[in-house]
Image (spheres, helix red, strand yellow):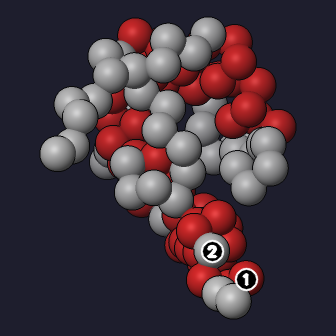
Amino acid sequence: MPSLLNSPAVKRTLAACFALPFIVLAGNATADGDGVWKGGENVYAKVCGHCHENKVGPQITGRQLPPQYITAIVRHGFRAMPAFPASFIDDNSLEQVAEYISKTSAPAAKP
């Protein structure tokens, strides 16, 4: 009988819990030099993609998720997804990344 700790869901949750403090502490460092994000793709690559491209969080690109849904989840959190306050990502940058995510095409299938 496999151990509960070996399940993929538990591993992803533990990885997210371990990575989150580092992501939060590096928040200002991940914004470009002047403290401003350079568009939605930049925010996704430097913040969201660390979890959502590495199977810690679910795949969110290519799903045509509504920007309002993305914004609500980012601000308030959901299950293992932590909430990101305005002190971490401002409203304008959040709107840009939500628009970017909602318009991305599905990733190429892996063999």
Q: Position of residue 94 (x, y in %)?
A: 58, 26
Residue identifier under label 2: 7
Viewer-side residue, 4 vs 94: 4
How many residues crowd around disc 2 within 10 Å: few (fewer than 14), some, or many (20 or more)?
few
Amino acid type assigned to the residue bearing label 1 in the image = Leu
Quadrant the C terminus occupies: top left
Q: Is residue 25 visible?
A: no
Q: Position of residue 80 (x, y in %)?
A: 74, 55
Q: Secondary structure at mark 1?
A: helix
Q: Is residue 71 left or right of residue 100?
A: right
Against 34, residue 6 (above or below) is below
Q: Position of residue 110 (x, y in %)?
A: 21, 43
**Disc assigned to residue 4:** 1
- Tags 1 and 2 in contact by the CB under 8 Å rule? yes
Residue plotted at (23% across, 34% down): 109
Q: Is residue 92 left or right of residue 41?
A: right
Q: Position of residue 41 (x, y in %)?
A: 33, 28
Amino acid type assigned to the residue bearing label 2 in the image = Ser
Q: Secondary structure at mark 2?
A: loop
Quadrant the N terminus occupies: bottom right
Residue plotted at (33% across, 34% down): 42
Viewer-side residue, 79 vs 35: 79
Residue plotted at (35% across, 17% down): 104
Real-space CA distance between mark 1 and mark 2, rounded to the nearest whole angstrom: 6 Å
Viewer-side residue, 66 vs 98: 66
Against 25, residue 36 (above or below) is above
Residue plotted at (40% across, 21% down): 62
